[in-house]
Amino acid sequence: MSVATERTTFESLNPATGEVVAEHPIHDEQAVRDAIERARKATAWWRELGWTERRTRLLNFKGALTRNLNRMAELIHQETGKPLQDAQLETVMAISHLDWAARNAQKVLGQRTVFPGLMSINQKCLLEYQPLGVVGVIGPWNYPIFTPMGSIGYALAAGNAVVFKPSEFTPGVGVLLAEIFDTAVPEQPVLQTVTGLGPTGAALAGAGTDKIAFTGSTRTAKRVMAACAEHLTPMVAECGGKDAFIVDADADLDAAADAALWGAMANAGQTCIGVERVYVVDSVYDAFLGKVSEKARELRPGFDREAAYGPITMPGQLDIIERHIKDALEKGGTAVVGGADSVRRPYVEPVVLADVPDDSAAVCEETFGPTITVHRVADLDEAVRKANDTSYGLAGTIFSGSRARAVEAARRLRGGMTSINAFAAFAMVGALPFGGVGESGFGRIHGADGLREFARSKAVTRQRFALPTNLVSFSRTEKDMERVLRLVAMVHAKRHK
Ligand code: NAD
Protein backbone atom coordinates (compact mmCIF):
# COMPACT_ATOMS: atom_id res chain seq x y z
CA MET A 1 0.00 0.00 0.00
CA SER A 2 1.42 3.33 -0.91
CA VAL A 3 1.09 6.16 1.52
CA ALA A 4 0.86 9.59 -0.01
CA THR A 5 3.47 11.81 1.55
CA GLU A 6 3.48 15.54 1.19
CA ARG A 7 6.40 16.78 -0.87
CA THR A 8 8.69 19.13 0.98
CA THR A 9 11.02 19.96 -1.89
CA PHE A 10 10.79 20.50 -5.64
CA GLU A 11 13.27 20.57 -8.49
CA SER A 12 13.95 23.35 -10.92
CA LEU A 13 14.74 21.96 -14.35
CA ASN A 14 16.65 23.21 -17.35
CA PRO A 15 13.85 23.28 -19.97
CA ALA A 16 16.29 22.64 -22.81
CA THR A 17 17.99 19.57 -21.38
CA GLY A 18 15.59 18.41 -18.68
CA GLU A 19 18.51 18.34 -16.23
CA VAL A 20 17.91 19.25 -12.60
CA VAL A 21 19.37 22.69 -11.88
CA ALA A 22 18.71 22.50 -8.13
CA GLU A 23 16.27 21.33 -5.47
CA HIS A 24 14.44 23.86 -3.32
CA PRO A 25 12.16 23.66 -0.28
CA ILE A 26 8.42 24.01 -0.63
CA HIS A 27 7.60 26.66 1.94
CA ASP A 28 4.20 25.98 3.46
CA GLU A 29 1.75 28.40 5.05
CA GLN A 30 3.56 28.37 8.38
CA ALA A 31 6.95 29.01 6.75
CA VAL A 32 5.47 31.94 4.82
CA ARG A 33 3.90 33.34 8.00
CA ASP A 34 7.26 33.04 9.78
CA ALA A 35 8.99 34.90 6.96
CA ILE A 36 6.39 37.69 7.20
CA GLU A 37 6.88 37.85 10.96
CA ARG A 38 10.64 38.28 10.51
CA ALA A 39 9.97 40.87 7.81
CA ARG A 40 7.74 42.84 10.21
CA LYS A 41 10.68 43.28 12.59
CA ALA A 42 13.08 44.02 9.74
CA THR A 43 10.82 46.68 8.27
CA ALA A 44 10.95 48.77 11.45
CA TRP A 45 14.75 48.64 11.39
CA TRP A 46 14.94 49.39 7.65
CA ARG A 47 12.61 52.34 8.04
CA GLU A 48 14.66 53.74 10.93
CA LEU A 49 17.81 53.69 8.80
CA GLY A 50 16.50 56.73 6.94
CA TRP A 51 16.80 57.79 3.31
CA THR A 52 20.56 58.30 3.09
CA GLU A 53 21.59 55.01 4.68
CA ARG A 54 18.93 53.04 2.77
CA ARG A 55 20.16 54.57 -0.47
CA THR A 56 23.76 53.56 0.38
CA ARG A 57 22.66 50.00 1.22
CA LEU A 58 20.64 49.68 -1.99
CA LEU A 59 23.49 51.04 -4.10
CA ASN A 60 25.73 48.44 -2.43
CA PHE A 61 23.13 45.78 -3.23
CA LYS A 62 23.30 46.99 -6.83
CA GLY A 63 27.11 46.84 -6.74
CA ALA A 64 27.06 43.28 -5.41
CA LEU A 65 24.51 42.25 -8.06
CA THR A 66 26.69 43.80 -10.76
CA ARG A 67 29.75 41.93 -9.49
CA ASN A 68 27.65 38.74 -9.60
CA LEU A 69 26.09 39.55 -12.98
CA ASN A 70 27.53 36.57 -14.82
CA ARG A 71 26.64 34.16 -12.04
CA MET A 72 23.08 35.45 -12.03
CA ALA A 73 22.83 35.40 -15.83
CA GLU A 74 24.14 31.83 -16.00
CA LEU A 75 21.47 30.74 -13.51
CA ILE A 76 18.73 32.51 -15.51
CA HIS A 77 20.10 30.83 -18.65
CA GLN A 78 19.90 27.43 -16.93
CA GLU A 79 16.47 27.88 -15.37
CA THR A 80 14.66 29.53 -18.31
CA GLY A 81 16.71 28.20 -21.23
CA LYS A 82 17.04 31.71 -22.71
CA PRO A 83 20.37 32.66 -24.36
CA LEU A 84 23.08 33.77 -21.95
CA GLN A 85 23.32 37.22 -23.56
CA ASP A 86 19.58 37.77 -23.08
CA ALA A 87 20.00 36.77 -19.44
CA GLN A 88 22.87 39.26 -19.12
CA LEU A 89 20.82 42.03 -20.72
CA GLU A 90 17.90 41.28 -18.41
CA THR A 91 20.17 41.53 -15.38
CA VAL A 92 21.59 44.84 -16.66
CA MET A 93 18.03 46.18 -16.92
CA ALA A 94 17.27 45.06 -13.37
CA ILE A 95 20.45 46.78 -12.16
CA SER A 96 19.53 50.07 -13.81
CA HIS A 97 16.06 50.02 -12.23
CA LEU A 98 17.50 49.30 -8.79
CA ASP A 99 19.88 52.21 -9.30
CA TRP A 100 17.05 54.58 -10.29
CA ALA A 101 14.84 53.54 -7.38
CA ALA A 102 17.67 53.93 -4.86
CA ARG A 103 18.68 57.37 -6.15
CA ASN A 104 15.20 58.82 -6.53
CA ALA A 105 13.25 57.48 -3.56
CA GLN A 106 13.84 60.45 -1.25
CA LYS A 107 13.12 63.00 -3.98
CA VAL A 108 9.80 61.34 -4.87
CA LEU A 109 8.65 60.20 -1.43
CA GLY A 110 10.47 62.38 1.09
CA GLN A 111 8.88 65.13 3.13
CA ARG A 112 8.05 68.39 1.34
CA THR A 113 5.85 71.41 1.96
CA VAL A 114 2.91 72.20 -0.26
CA PHE A 115 1.09 75.51 -0.75
CA PRO A 116 -1.99 75.58 1.48
CA GLY A 117 -4.20 77.81 -0.72
CA LEU A 118 -5.73 81.14 0.19
CA MET A 119 -8.34 79.85 2.63
CA SER A 120 -5.72 77.99 4.69
CA ILE A 121 -2.89 80.47 4.36
CA ASN A 122 -2.19 80.21 8.11
CA GLN A 123 -1.33 76.49 7.81
CA LYS A 124 2.01 74.94 7.08
CA CYS A 125 1.39 71.80 4.99
CA LEU A 126 3.71 68.83 5.07
CA LEU A 127 3.41 65.88 2.73
CA GLU A 128 5.41 62.67 2.78
CA TYR A 129 5.03 59.11 1.53
CA GLN A 130 5.60 56.52 4.23
CA PRO A 131 6.43 52.84 3.67
CA LEU A 132 3.55 50.36 3.79
CA GLY A 133 5.42 47.78 5.88
CA VAL A 134 5.81 44.30 4.40
CA VAL A 135 5.33 43.82 0.67
CA GLY A 136 4.81 40.35 -0.82
CA VAL A 137 6.17 40.01 -4.34
CA ILE A 138 5.00 37.09 -6.51
CA GLY A 139 7.01 36.74 -9.70
CA PRO A 140 6.91 35.01 -13.10
CA TRP A 141 9.63 32.96 -14.80
CA ASN A 142 9.94 34.67 -18.17
CA TYR A 143 12.03 37.60 -16.89
CA PRO A 144 12.84 36.21 -13.46
CA ILE A 145 15.03 39.11 -12.29
CA PHE A 146 13.96 42.10 -14.39
CA THR A 147 10.25 41.77 -13.69
CA PRO A 148 10.31 41.20 -9.91
CA MET A 149 12.98 43.90 -9.50
CA GLY A 150 10.39 46.39 -10.74
CA SER A 151 8.55 45.70 -7.50
CA ILE A 152 11.37 44.57 -5.16
CA GLY A 153 13.77 47.46 -5.88
CA TYR A 154 11.06 50.11 -5.67
CA ALA A 155 9.41 48.62 -2.57
CA LEU A 156 12.75 48.43 -0.74
CA ALA A 157 13.67 51.97 -1.78
CA ALA A 158 10.32 53.17 -0.40
CA GLY A 159 11.32 51.69 2.98
CA ASN A 160 9.47 48.36 2.98
CA ALA A 161 10.68 44.86 3.77
CA VAL A 162 9.97 42.33 1.02
CA VAL A 163 9.06 38.65 0.99
CA PHE A 164 9.61 37.36 -2.54
CA LYS A 165 8.04 34.22 -3.99
CA PRO A 166 9.72 33.53 -7.35
CA SER A 167 8.13 31.28 -9.97
CA GLU A 168 8.57 27.55 -9.42
CA PHE A 169 10.41 27.50 -12.77
CA THR A 170 13.03 30.00 -11.58
CA PRO A 171 13.37 29.61 -7.80
CA GLY A 172 17.18 29.73 -7.86
CA VAL A 173 17.15 33.29 -9.22
CA GLY A 174 15.08 34.40 -6.21
CA VAL A 175 17.30 32.57 -3.76
CA LEU A 176 20.46 34.06 -5.25
CA LEU A 177 18.95 37.55 -5.28
CA ALA A 178 18.22 37.41 -1.53
CA GLU A 179 21.68 35.96 -0.91
CA ILE A 180 23.31 38.88 -2.74
CA PHE A 181 21.10 41.34 -0.86
CA ASP A 182 22.27 39.87 2.45
CA THR A 183 25.86 40.83 1.65
CA ALA A 184 24.82 44.50 1.47
CA VAL A 185 22.32 44.32 4.35
CA PRO A 186 23.51 41.56 6.69
CA GLU A 187 21.81 42.85 9.87
CA GLN A 188 18.14 42.11 9.17
CA PRO A 189 16.12 39.96 6.72
CA VAL A 190 14.82 42.94 4.76
CA LEU A 191 14.55 40.86 1.59
CA GLN A 192 13.62 37.20 1.98
CA THR A 193 12.80 34.62 -0.66
CA VAL A 194 10.29 31.84 -0.08
CA THR A 195 10.18 29.04 -2.65
CA GLY A 196 7.42 26.70 -3.72
CA LEU A 197 4.61 26.16 -6.19
CA GLY A 198 1.29 27.98 -6.52
CA PRO A 199 0.14 27.26 -2.94
CA THR A 200 3.20 29.05 -1.54
CA GLY A 201 2.17 32.10 -3.58
CA ALA A 202 -1.40 31.69 -2.35
CA ALA A 203 -0.16 31.57 1.26
CA LEU A 204 1.70 34.86 0.72
CA ALA A 205 -1.31 36.49 -0.96
CA GLY A 206 -3.61 35.50 1.89
CA ALA A 207 -1.28 36.28 4.79
CA GLY A 208 -2.22 39.90 5.34
CA THR A 209 0.94 41.60 4.07
CA ASP A 210 0.61 45.34 3.49
CA LYS A 211 0.64 44.92 -0.28
CA ILE A 212 0.99 42.21 -2.89
CA ALA A 213 2.88 42.95 -6.09
CA PHE A 214 1.89 40.20 -8.49
CA THR A 215 3.33 39.58 -11.94
CA GLY A 216 2.04 36.63 -13.92
CA SER A 217 -0.99 35.49 -15.86
CA THR A 218 -4.35 37.24 -15.73
CA ARG A 219 -5.95 34.00 -14.54
CA THR A 220 -3.68 33.75 -11.48
CA ALA A 221 -4.02 37.49 -10.81
CA LYS A 222 -7.77 36.98 -10.28
CA ARG A 223 -7.08 34.25 -7.72
CA VAL A 224 -4.50 36.41 -5.96
CA MET A 225 -6.95 39.30 -5.85
CA ALA A 226 -9.58 37.06 -4.27
CA ALA A 227 -7.06 35.95 -1.62
CA CYS A 228 -6.07 39.58 -0.98
CA ALA A 229 -9.73 40.48 -0.40
CA GLU A 230 -9.71 38.51 2.86
CA HIS A 231 -7.49 41.10 4.58
CA LEU A 232 -8.22 44.04 2.25
CA THR A 233 -4.61 43.73 1.12
CA PRO A 234 -4.00 46.16 -1.76
CA MET A 235 -2.47 44.76 -4.89
CA VAL A 236 -0.61 45.72 -8.02
CA ALA A 237 -1.28 43.34 -10.90
CA GLU A 238 1.12 43.06 -13.84
CA CYS A 239 -0.50 40.51 -16.13
CA GLY A 240 -0.48 39.22 -19.66
CA GLY A 241 -0.78 41.09 -22.92
CA LYS A 242 -1.54 40.86 -26.63
CA ASP A 243 0.56 43.75 -27.82
CA ALA A 244 0.30 45.25 -31.26
CA PHE A 245 3.01 46.60 -33.53
CA ILE A 246 1.95 49.17 -36.12
CA VAL A 247 3.80 49.94 -39.34
CA ASP A 248 2.87 53.24 -41.00
CA ALA A 249 3.15 53.93 -44.74
CA ASP A 250 6.32 56.02 -44.36
CA ALA A 251 8.07 53.81 -41.77
CA ASP A 252 11.65 52.64 -42.14
CA LEU A 253 10.71 49.09 -43.16
CA ASP A 254 14.07 47.46 -42.46
CA ALA A 255 14.17 48.88 -38.95
CA ALA A 256 10.50 47.99 -38.42
CA ALA A 257 11.00 44.37 -39.57
CA ASP A 258 14.06 44.02 -37.34
CA ALA A 259 12.23 45.40 -34.28
CA ALA A 260 9.03 43.42 -34.91
CA LEU A 261 11.00 40.22 -35.20
CA TRP A 262 12.94 40.84 -32.00
CA GLY A 263 9.76 41.88 -30.18
CA ALA A 264 7.96 38.73 -31.32
CA MET A 265 10.65 36.07 -31.21
CA ALA A 266 13.21 37.08 -28.57
CA ASN A 267 12.91 34.91 -25.46
CA ALA A 268 10.91 32.54 -27.70
CA GLY A 269 8.06 35.07 -27.62
CA GLN A 270 7.63 34.59 -23.87
CA THR A 271 7.42 38.30 -23.15
CA CYS A 272 4.45 40.07 -21.59
CA ILE A 273 5.09 43.08 -23.85
CA GLY A 274 6.06 40.85 -26.77
CA VAL A 275 4.78 41.60 -30.26
CA GLU A 276 1.87 39.27 -31.06
CA ARG A 277 -0.07 41.20 -33.72
CA VAL A 278 1.35 43.40 -36.48
CA TYR A 279 -0.83 45.90 -38.35
CA VAL A 280 0.72 47.21 -41.57
CA VAL A 281 -0.64 50.00 -43.76
CA ASP A 282 -1.71 48.62 -47.16
CA SER A 283 0.90 50.39 -49.36
CA VAL A 284 3.84 48.79 -47.50
CA TYR A 285 2.20 45.52 -46.41
CA ASP A 286 3.79 43.25 -49.02
CA ALA A 287 7.24 44.79 -48.65
CA PHE A 288 7.11 44.53 -44.84
CA LEU A 289 5.81 40.96 -44.85
CA GLY A 290 8.60 40.01 -47.27
CA LYS A 291 11.29 41.55 -45.06
CA VAL A 292 10.00 40.16 -41.77
CA SER A 293 9.56 36.68 -43.27
CA GLU A 294 13.04 36.65 -44.77
CA LYS A 295 14.59 37.59 -41.42
CA ALA A 296 12.40 35.10 -39.52
CA ARG A 297 13.61 32.20 -41.66
CA GLU A 298 17.16 32.91 -40.47
CA LEU A 299 16.30 32.43 -36.79
CA ARG A 300 17.03 29.15 -35.07
CA PRO A 301 16.02 28.17 -31.55
CA GLY A 302 18.39 26.14 -29.38
CA PHE A 303 20.45 26.08 -26.22
CA ASP A 304 23.83 26.69 -27.84
CA ARG A 305 25.67 30.01 -28.08
CA GLU A 306 24.55 30.73 -31.65
CA ALA A 307 20.83 30.07 -31.02
CA ALA A 308 18.58 33.10 -31.52
CA TYR A 309 16.32 32.05 -28.70
CA GLY A 310 15.75 29.16 -26.34
CA PRO A 311 13.07 26.58 -25.62
CA ILE A 312 9.55 27.15 -24.33
CA THR A 313 10.20 27.26 -20.59
CA MET A 314 6.83 25.98 -19.43
CA PRO A 315 5.97 22.67 -21.18
CA GLY A 316 2.21 23.30 -20.96
CA GLN A 317 2.57 26.42 -23.13
CA LEU A 318 3.58 24.31 -26.14
CA ASP A 319 0.02 23.00 -26.45
CA ILE A 320 -1.37 26.53 -26.41
CA ILE A 321 1.05 27.70 -29.12
CA GLU A 322 0.21 24.67 -31.26
CA ARG A 323 -3.52 25.23 -30.81
CA HIS A 324 -3.21 28.90 -31.84
CA ILE A 325 -1.29 28.06 -35.02
CA LYS A 326 -3.70 25.28 -36.02
CA ASP A 327 -6.77 27.39 -35.29
CA ALA A 328 -5.38 30.27 -37.36
CA LEU A 329 -4.74 27.98 -40.33
CA GLU A 330 -8.10 26.22 -40.04
CA LYS A 331 -9.86 29.59 -40.05
CA GLY A 332 -8.23 30.56 -43.36
CA GLY A 333 -4.88 32.03 -42.29
CA THR A 334 -1.69 31.47 -44.28
CA ALA A 335 1.60 30.31 -42.77
CA VAL A 336 4.19 32.49 -44.52
CA VAL A 337 6.97 31.10 -42.34
CA GLY A 338 6.70 27.77 -40.48
CA GLY A 339 3.37 26.24 -39.53
CA ALA A 340 1.85 23.72 -37.16
CA ASP A 341 4.91 21.47 -37.43
CA SER A 342 7.15 24.31 -36.19
CA VAL A 343 6.37 23.09 -32.68
CA ARG A 344 9.28 20.71 -31.98
CA ARG A 345 9.28 20.19 -28.25
CA PRO A 346 10.74 21.89 -26.28
CA TYR A 347 11.39 24.36 -29.13
CA VAL A 348 9.14 26.31 -31.45
CA GLU A 349 10.61 27.53 -34.72
CA PRO A 350 9.58 30.98 -35.98
CA VAL A 351 6.04 31.25 -37.30
CA VAL A 352 4.72 34.18 -39.36
CA LEU A 353 1.00 34.03 -40.10
CA ALA A 354 -0.95 36.23 -42.52
CA ASP A 355 -4.65 36.69 -43.32
CA VAL A 356 -5.64 35.38 -39.90
CA PRO A 357 -9.26 36.28 -39.00
CA ASP A 358 -9.71 38.66 -36.08
CA ASP A 359 -11.73 36.13 -34.08
CA SER A 360 -9.06 33.42 -34.06
CA ALA A 361 -7.19 32.47 -30.89
CA ALA A 362 -3.88 33.69 -32.35
CA VAL A 363 -5.36 37.21 -32.52
CA CYS A 364 -7.47 37.23 -29.35
CA GLU A 365 -5.53 35.22 -26.73
CA GLU A 366 -1.99 35.58 -25.41
CA THR A 367 0.09 33.05 -27.41
CA PHE A 368 3.42 33.51 -25.59
CA GLY A 369 5.41 31.86 -28.36
CA PRO A 370 7.64 32.88 -31.31
CA THR A 371 4.67 33.51 -33.60
CA ILE A 372 3.17 36.66 -35.12
CA THR A 373 0.09 37.45 -37.12
CA VAL A 374 0.56 40.17 -39.76
CA HIS A 375 -2.54 42.12 -40.85
CA ARG A 376 -3.22 44.54 -43.68
CA VAL A 377 -4.95 47.82 -42.71
CA ALA A 378 -6.05 50.85 -44.74
CA ASP A 379 -4.35 53.47 -42.58
CA LEU A 380 -3.02 54.35 -39.15
CA ASP A 381 -6.54 54.95 -37.81
CA GLU A 382 -7.65 51.43 -38.65
CA ALA A 383 -4.40 50.09 -37.19
CA VAL A 384 -5.06 51.83 -33.87
CA ARG A 385 -8.68 50.70 -33.85
CA LYS A 386 -7.71 47.07 -34.41
CA ALA A 387 -4.81 47.23 -31.99
CA ASN A 388 -7.24 48.45 -29.31
CA ASP A 389 -9.79 45.73 -30.05
CA THR A 390 -8.63 43.42 -27.25
CA SER A 391 -9.41 42.86 -23.59
CA TYR A 392 -5.70 43.33 -22.84
CA GLY A 393 -3.88 46.65 -22.76
CA LEU A 394 -0.23 46.49 -21.83
CA ALA A 395 2.06 48.16 -24.38
CA GLY A 396 2.57 48.67 -28.11
CA THR A 397 4.93 49.85 -30.83
CA ILE A 398 4.51 52.25 -33.75
CA PHE A 399 6.96 52.67 -36.62
CA SER A 400 6.30 55.83 -38.60
CA GLY A 401 8.21 58.51 -40.49
CA SER A 402 5.93 61.22 -39.12
CA ARG A 403 6.71 62.26 -35.58
CA ALA A 404 3.42 64.08 -35.01
CA ARG A 405 1.27 61.30 -36.44
CA ALA A 406 3.11 58.65 -34.46
CA VAL A 407 2.85 60.51 -31.14
CA GLU A 408 -0.85 61.17 -31.71
CA ALA A 409 -1.48 57.48 -32.50
CA ALA A 410 0.70 56.38 -29.57
CA ARG A 411 -1.47 58.39 -27.18
CA ARG A 412 -4.59 56.69 -28.55
CA LEU A 413 -3.26 53.15 -28.10
CA ARG A 414 -4.94 51.54 -25.09
CA GLY A 415 -2.28 50.47 -22.61
CA GLY A 416 0.35 51.85 -20.28
CA MET A 417 3.29 52.25 -22.65
CA THR A 418 3.97 52.81 -26.35
CA SER A 419 7.37 52.86 -28.03
CA ILE A 420 7.89 54.74 -31.32
CA ASN A 421 10.49 53.58 -33.88
CA ALA A 422 12.02 51.07 -31.42
CA PHE A 423 10.75 48.05 -29.54
CA ALA A 424 9.89 48.47 -25.82
CA ALA A 425 12.38 51.30 -25.24
CA PHE A 426 10.36 52.39 -22.17
CA ALA A 427 11.25 49.21 -20.25
CA MET A 428 14.85 50.35 -19.74
CA VAL A 429 13.93 53.85 -18.52
CA GLY A 430 13.85 54.06 -14.73
CA ALA A 431 11.86 57.29 -14.75
CA LEU A 432 8.94 55.85 -16.75
CA PRO A 433 6.05 53.93 -15.15
CA PHE A 434 5.17 50.45 -16.41
CA GLY A 435 1.80 48.74 -16.19
CA GLY A 436 -1.36 47.84 -18.00
CA VAL A 437 -5.10 48.36 -18.23
CA GLY A 438 -7.98 45.89 -18.53
CA GLU A 439 -6.92 42.23 -18.43
CA SER A 440 -3.28 43.34 -18.40
CA GLY A 441 -3.70 44.49 -14.82
CA PHE A 442 -3.54 47.70 -12.81
CA GLY A 443 -1.13 49.73 -10.77
CA ARG A 444 2.36 50.73 -11.86
CA ILE A 445 5.91 49.60 -11.27
CA HIS A 446 8.98 51.71 -12.23
CA GLY A 447 9.33 55.48 -12.05
CA ALA A 448 7.88 57.84 -9.48
CA ASP A 449 4.49 56.06 -9.77
CA GLY A 450 6.26 52.78 -9.04
CA LEU A 451 7.77 54.21 -5.86
CA ARG A 452 4.43 55.65 -4.73
CA GLU A 453 2.81 52.26 -5.38
CA PHE A 454 4.72 50.99 -2.34
CA ALA A 455 4.05 53.95 -0.03
CA ARG A 456 1.10 55.77 1.46
CA SER A 457 0.74 59.50 1.64
CA LYS A 458 0.81 61.19 5.01
CA ALA A 459 -0.49 64.74 5.22
CA VAL A 460 0.29 66.97 8.22
CA THR A 461 -0.88 70.54 8.74
CA ARG A 462 0.51 72.83 11.44
CA GLN A 463 -1.28 76.08 12.28
CA ARG A 464 1.27 78.90 12.23
CA PHE A 465 -1.07 81.68 13.43
CA ALA A 466 -4.76 82.18 14.10
CA LEU A 467 -6.82 83.94 11.41
CA PRO A 468 -9.02 86.86 12.51
CA THR A 469 -12.02 84.71 11.58
CA ASN A 470 -12.17 81.16 12.85
CA LEU A 471 -14.76 79.36 10.73
CA VAL A 472 -14.60 76.08 12.63
CA SER A 473 -15.47 77.37 16.06
CA PHE A 474 -18.77 77.89 17.85
CA SER A 475 -17.63 81.49 18.32
CA ARG A 476 -18.17 82.10 14.57
CA THR A 477 -20.64 84.92 13.86
CA GLU A 478 -22.95 85.58 10.94
CA LYS A 479 -20.80 88.57 9.99
CA ASP A 480 -17.71 86.34 9.85
CA MET A 481 -19.48 84.05 7.41
CA GLU A 482 -20.70 86.97 5.28
CA ARG A 483 -17.13 88.28 5.00
CA VAL A 484 -15.89 84.87 3.94
CA LEU A 485 -18.66 84.42 1.37
CA ARG A 486 -17.81 87.85 -0.15
CA LEU A 487 -14.17 86.78 -0.39
CA VAL A 488 -15.09 83.44 -1.95
CA ALA A 489 -17.32 85.18 -4.51
CA MET A 490 -14.46 87.54 -5.41
CA VAL A 491 -12.00 84.67 -5.93
CA HIS A 492 -14.15 81.91 -7.41
CA ALA A 493 -17.37 83.28 -8.95
CA LYS A 494 -15.98 84.73 -12.15
CA ARG A 495 -16.63 82.97 -15.47
CA HIS A 496 -13.68 81.57 -17.40
CA LYS A 497 -13.33 81.55 -21.15
P1 NAD B 1 1.56 32.35 -13.48
O1 NAD B 1 0.34 33.17 -13.27
O2 NAD B 1 1.40 30.93 -13.84
O3 NAD B 1 2.47 32.37 -12.18
C1 NAD B 1 2.97 33.58 -11.63
C2 NAD B 1 3.32 33.35 -10.17
O4 NAD B 1 2.13 33.12 -9.43
C3 NAD B 1 4.23 32.15 -9.91
O5 NAD B 1 5.18 32.50 -8.93
C4 NAD B 1 3.26 31.11 -9.36
O6 NAD B 1 3.85 30.18 -8.50
C5 NAD B 1 2.31 31.99 -8.59
N1 NAD B 1 0.99 31.40 -8.33
C6 NAD B 1 0.37 30.38 -8.98
N2 NAD B 1 -0.84 30.16 -8.43
C7 NAD B 1 -0.99 31.04 -7.43
C8 NAD B 1 -2.03 31.33 -6.51
N3 NAD B 1 -3.18 30.65 -6.53
N4 NAD B 1 -1.85 32.33 -5.62
C9 NAD B 1 -0.71 33.04 -5.61
N5 NAD B 1 0.31 32.83 -6.45
C10 NAD B 1 0.17 31.83 -7.36
O7 NAD B 1 2.40 33.16 -14.58
P2 NAD B 1 3.75 32.72 -15.28
O8 NAD B 1 3.46 31.62 -16.24
O9 NAD B 1 4.82 32.54 -14.27
O10 NAD B 1 4.13 34.04 -16.09
C11 NAD B 1 3.71 34.28 -17.40
C12 NAD B 1 2.62 35.33 -17.41
O11 NAD B 1 3.10 36.49 -16.78
C13 NAD B 1 2.23 35.76 -18.82
O12 NAD B 1 0.85 35.91 -18.90
C14 NAD B 1 2.94 37.10 -18.97
O13 NAD B 1 2.36 37.95 -19.91
C15 NAD B 1 2.86 37.63 -17.58
N6 NAD B 1 3.89 38.64 -17.33
C16 NAD B 1 3.49 39.93 -17.15
C17 NAD B 1 4.43 40.93 -16.95
C18 NAD B 1 4.02 42.37 -16.77
O14 NAD B 1 4.84 43.14 -16.33
N7 NAD B 1 2.80 42.74 -17.07
C19 NAD B 1 5.79 40.59 -16.90
C20 NAD B 1 6.16 39.27 -17.07
C21 NAD B 1 5.19 38.30 -17.28
Image (spheres, helix red, strand yellow):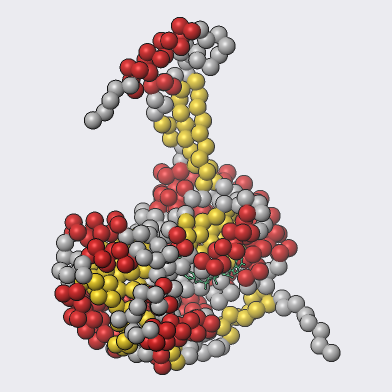
Q: Is residue 37 above or below residue 307?
A: above
Kindly tell me whether residue 259 is visible in this rendering.
no
Q: Residue at x 50, y 15 (%)?
A: 471
Q: Nearer the viewer, residue 216 or 134?
A: 216
Q: Residue furthest right?
A: 1
| Image coords of residue 247 (percent x, y) | 23, 70
Q: Is residue 152 above or below residue 470?
A: below
Kindly tell me whether residue 439 is visible in this rendering.
yes
Q: Nearer the viewer, residue 133 or 119?
A: 119
Q: Residue at x 34, y 85 (%)?
A: 332
| Image coords of residue 18 (percent x, y) | 55, 88
Task: Please state if 252 lies on the left or on the right of 472 as rendered.
Answer: left
Task: Please state if 418 lies on the left or on the right of 177 as rendered.
Answer: left
Q: Quadrant of residue 410?
A: bottom left
Task: Please state if 129 lies on the left or on the right of 195 as rendered.
Answer: left
| Image coords of residue 14 (percent x, y) | 53, 84
Q: Residue at x 38, y 21 (%)?
A: 118
| Image coords of residue 56 (percent x, y) | 47, 52
What quarter of the picture does the C terminus occupy? Answer: top left
Q: Quadrant of residue 297?
A: bottom left
How many numbered circles are shown? 0
Q: Quadrant of residue 377?
A: bottom left
Q: Residue at x 45, y 6 (%)?
A: 479
Task: Please state if 299 lies on the left or on the right of 10 as rendered.
Answer: left
Q: Nearer the viewer, residue 431 or 354?
A: 354
What quarter of the picture does the N terminus occupy? Answer: bottom right
